[in-house]
Image (spheres, rainbow, N blue to C red):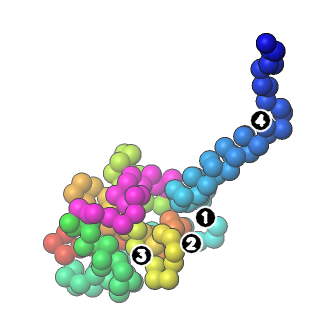
């Protein structure tokens, strides 16, 4: 009976395994779409307040029509079309008022023609929400707005 030598991995095998794991990790990070952790350039990084003169019964004109569907889902408590919807928004950019972790939640506002979540979000503050923010540029700027029956 012949004895077989145990199989040993070559350095090349380890290289491809590590390259594959790195690629998988990069893909997962990109799927999260958390956005950059640095302050945006220029004066785009700010929170703009909605006009107080606008009637509170109506939503502000800057919200796209798809935001109305997102707000209806938030009111119903889901189900949401994206697994990230309703998850904690960490405010890494520091553009929203400082609050404890878990205060803010993010929700996708669909972008017609995009095959992914794209850049538009509604971020709420509080449980139940008492603060409402819209971003069209993936957290580089926010516009605050109020909902009917909200202070």
N-terminal label among 4 and 3: 4
Dot 3 falls on a residue whose secondary structure is loop
Dot 4 falls on a residue whose secondary structure is helix
* Residue 21, above or below 89: above
| Cα gap from disc 4 to disc 3, whole angstroms | 41 Å
| Cα gap from disc 2 to disc 4, whole angstroms | 45 Å
The foreground one among 122 and 83 is 83
Labels 2 and 1 touching (C-beta < 8 A): yes
Residue at the left extreme of this rendering: 149
The numbered dot on residue 110 is 3
Mark 2 or 3: the one toward you: 3
N-terminal label among 2 and 4: 4
Label 4: few (<14), some (14–19) or many (≥20) C-alpha neighbours in 10 Å: few
The foreground one among 92 and 2 is 2
Task: Identify the residue position indicated by label 4 in the image.
Answer: 14
The numbered dot on residue 40 is 1
Dot 2 falls on a residue whose secondary structure is loop
N-terminal label among 1 and 3: 1
> Image check: 128 left or right of 131?
left
N-terminal label among 2 and 3: 2
Label 3: few (<14), some (14–19) or many (≥20) C-alpha neighbours in 10 Å: many
User: Is residue 106 visible from the viewing direction of this image?
Assistant: no
Q: Is residue 51 magenta?
A: no
Q: Main secondary structure of the magenta part?
A: loop
Please identify the quadrant where the C terminus is shown: bottom left
Mark 4 or 1: the one toward you: 4
Task: Identify the residue position indicated by label 2 in the image.
Answer: 44
Mark 4 or 3: the one toward you: 4
| Cα gap from disc 2 to disc 1, whole angstroms | 7 Å
User: Is residue 60 visible from the viewing direction of this image?
Assistant: yes
């Amino acid at each position: 009976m012949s004895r077989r030598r145990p199989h040993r991995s070559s350095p090349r095998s380890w290289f491809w395994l590590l390259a594959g794991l790195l690629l998988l990790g990069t893909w997962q990070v990109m799927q999260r779409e958390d956005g950059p952790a640095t302050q945006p350039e220029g004066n785009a990084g700010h929170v703009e307040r909605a006009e107080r003169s606008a009637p509170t019964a109506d939503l502000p004109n800057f919200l796209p029509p798809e935001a109305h569907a997102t707000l209806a889902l938030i009111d119903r408590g889901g189900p949401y079309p994206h697994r990230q919807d309703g998850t904690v928004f960490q405010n890494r950019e520091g553009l929203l008022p400082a609050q404890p972790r878990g205060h803010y939640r993010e929700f996708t506002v669909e972008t017609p023609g995009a095959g992914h979540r794209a850049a538009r979000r509604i971020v709420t503050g509080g449980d139940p929400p008492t603060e409402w923010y819209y971003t069209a540029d993936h957290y580089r700027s926010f516009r605050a707005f109020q909902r009917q029956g909200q202070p």
